[in-house]
Amino acid sequence: MVKFFKYSAAGNDFVIINGCELRNFALTKENIIKICDRRFGVGADGILLHSAPESGNAHAKMTIFNSDGSTAEMCGNGIRCFALYLIKDCGFSFDPLKIETGNGLLEARCEKAGNTFRISATLGKAKVIDETKKISFEGTSFLRTGISTGNPHLVYIPETETGIDVSELWKLRELGYETNVELVSSIDCTKNCAKVDVYERGAGKTLACGTGGAAVVNTLYLAGKIQKNQPFTIKYPGGDIDYTITENGETIISGIPLKIFTGEFEG
């Protein structure tokens, strides 16, 4: 039997497994798909594998598997869930927690919030992978920007209200390869928030995406709509996620992840 932990952040849910638990069970593509299946498995947007870090500066290593069996470089909600798991289930007390990821060594800080913790994590500096362009799709004009926040995103901001589903925009594959896609349906710079839907490569439509929100916030910053050190909230179908771009250009993600349950599956 393989022990696992189920965590969620704004509806973005993960199965977390300590590599020591796997023994002879391999995380093959087929097995990952089975575990993440919501009818015949545990059900999750992805799997986070906990292993010993390769760097002496890190406390733990996090490897991310999407629900289709592919790997991801980074996951903003995943690192927050992983940090809470390290605290609750592994007894880690480091602050900050230094976590080795496919996007390098990142830090997570913990703030007591009732009987749990608010987790804030650095996502590093965003990079523009495709300059803002005006495109038209099914009669709607969009401003579209390519941003990497550890993994690639295309952020679509419609110039008028649209009924287009984010999955239709994902199918465009405008960069010639698969990216995550965010559709910003409304922006309120007075209340410092935006409403966003997401389609993740490797997982499909999800209730939230941590690095996707960071891509949206950095897109708005580049457009001059928000400033550094300005708190900004991304409102996903699964809940709200808070962001800040620091003075040195790094993006901080913050929110309260939840431990859902612990269980075992046959390995």
Image: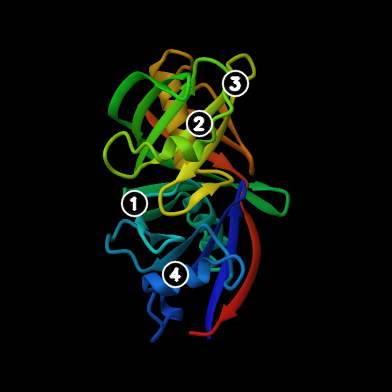
Q: Position of residue 57 (x, y in %)?
A: 31, 56
Q: Secondary structure at mark 3?
A: loop
Compare marks 4 and 3 and give the one earlier in the sequence.
Answer: 4
Which residue is at a point 62% across and 14% down the rendered structure image?
Answer: 190
Label 2 and label 1: CA atoms lie apart by 21 Å
Front-lying residue, 104 or 175: 175
Q: Amino acid at mark 2?
A: Leu
The residue labelled by disc 4 is 32
The kind of residue on which mark 3 rests is Asn
- In the rendering, at what x and y percent does residue 74 appear? 38, 49
- Of mark 4 and mark 2, the one earlier in the sequence is 4
Tell me whether the residue at label 2 lies in contact with that at label 1, contact meaning CB atoms closer than 8 angstroms: no
* In this view, the mark in front (4 or 3): 4
Q: Report how far apart the C-alphas of labels 1 and 4 lie in the structure.
A: 17 Å
**Is 242 situated above or below 2?**
above
Q: CA distance from mark 4 to mark 3?
A: 38 Å
Please tell me whether residue 207 is drawn above or below residue 99 in the rendered image.
above
Answer whether labels 1 and 4 touch (C-beta < 8 Å). no
Classify mark 2: helix, strand or loop. strand
Q: Residue at x 35, y 58 (%)?
A: 71
Q: Quadrant of residue 185?
A: top right
* Tag 3–tag 1 contact (CB < 8 Å): no
In the figure, 145 relative to 98: above or below?
above
Q: On the image, numbered disc 1 is attached to which residue?
A: 73
Q: Residue furthest front?
A: 138
Q: Which mark is residue 192?
A: 3
Side of 148 relative to 168 (left or right): left
Quarter of the image for residue 248 reads top left
Q: Amino acid at mark 1?
A: Glu
